[in-house]
Amino acid sequence: MSKFNVAVVGATGAVGREIVKILEERKFPIKDLVLLASERSAGETIFFKKKEFTVQEPNKNSFENINIALFSAGSTVSRKFAPIAVKTGAIVIDNSSAFRMDSHVPLIVPEVNPQSIMNHSGIIANPNCSTIQMVIALKPILDEVGINRIIVSTYQSVSGTGKSAIDELTEQSSQILNNKKTTRKVYPHQIAFNILPHIDVFEDNGYTKEEMKLIHETKKILGNNKIKITATAARVPVFYGHSESVYIETNNHISINKLKKIYLKTKGIKLVDDIENNKYPIAIMSEIYDDVMVGRLRKDLTEPNGISMWIVANNLRKGAALNAVQIAELLI
Ligand code: 25A
Ligand code: L14
């Protein structure tokens, strides 16, 4: 099998570190690995297959001889360096929100729309973490009976914001438990022992950008512009794993039993739904399982085609790093 030269941009971040781990776990065929991050981290070393790699600051020559560049350093860095990487011949898999809605950029979840990857022109986008886990859970239903409406509320962990937010939740929790005044840098309010209905910036329509990403990206990935979607995204004081309450209305009827049977044989999904034994997906399980976990499946009591469910996944892995590496696997 041929091997590839791979660059990771944002290698020292919460997502970037996970990318490096997953490339090793999944034995991605790597010839050379180049790790890039801001000047803050340049010179730091990261282990890959027991070898030390030194982190460098990216410049316009960083992508020479690179075949695949995995970006996870935020939109500004992607806008600046992704076009340079593409120009020098690399294919970019971008974790930021910079290019996701561009018409010539495929937005890929390998379990859902692998065929869309064919139409790339150098950049392939990795969707938002909350979108990825939702479309994986909804795709089998869409294929079976169609979906005309989605109402989603998210309960998102702080690791989505990066390491600084993980530190903020740790510090504030300790401050509160020690009767000290809380300090904050990352979020506009105290996050420890609190819930904030605010992720990313507010748009003119009163929704947050995170909520609008869920709406737009879901339609693009599912290739369906007619689905009615509304979203509320909230930040909860959880370190890892995003949870979602999702209510859908299907076009045709499907029983909960039939749906469970479909989920049991769907790759990438783990059905965790045994309420008699208190079994349902919970955020901390996402530190163990890579599959998207689905449970609390139940019929709506008023709408014949309404179904509610609870969906949990690891936002740093399936929601970001793992999905990106799976896109790279699909590509090669
Ligand atoms: O713009 P977006 O798309 O909305 O994305 C916003 C952020 O979301 C994360 C990612 O943060 C990004 O910055 N992210 C990206 N995709 C994601 C996804 N799918 C995602 N989150 C969830 N799901 P991150 O913390 O995970 O990673 C940031 C990485 O980018 C590197 N970086 C920053 N500027 C760069 C750059 N790399 C190259 N060139 C640049 N100009 C960044 O490196 C990190 O690897 P770093 O050296 O800046 O960070 C190393 C450590 O330092 C901490 N840190 C961050 N900010 C500061 C800081 N330390 C001191 N002062 C600071 N101001 C970080 O926590 C990191 O651990
Ligand atoms: O991928 O949780 O668009 O703060 C940007 C913000 C991911 C999560 C994205 C957060 C995100 C994120």
Image: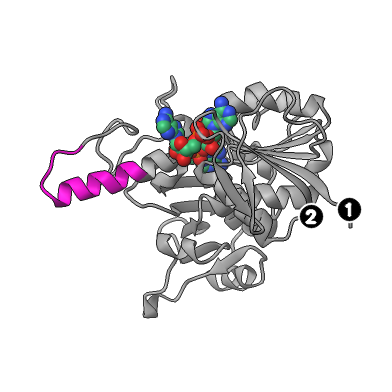
Mark 2 neighbour density, 10 Å: few (under 14) some (14–19) many (20 or more): some
Type of amino acid under label 1: Ser
Mark 1 neighbour density, 10 Å: few (under 14) some (14–19) many (20 or more): few
Q: Which residues are magenta?
A: 167-182
Residue at mark 2 = 29
Q: Nearer the viewer, residue 133 or 189?
A: 189
Query: Is residue 60 visible in this depiction of the protein?
Result: yes
Query: In the rendered image of this protein, does residue 126 appear above or below residue 265?
Result: above
Q: Which residue extends farthest top? A: 204
Query: Is residue 193 visible in this depiction of the protein?
Result: no
Query: Which residue: 41% across, 57% down?
Result: 302
x, y (%) of residue 312?
Answer: 48, 58
x, y (%) of residue 76?
Answer: 57, 24
Q: Earlier in the sequence, mark 1 or mark 2?
A: 1
Give the side of residue 146 with respect to residue 118, left or right: left
x, y (%) of residue 135?
Answer: 60, 50
Q: Quadrant of residue 195?
A: top left
Query: Which residue: 43% across, 19% down?
Result: 204
Q: Is residue 175 magenta?
A: yes
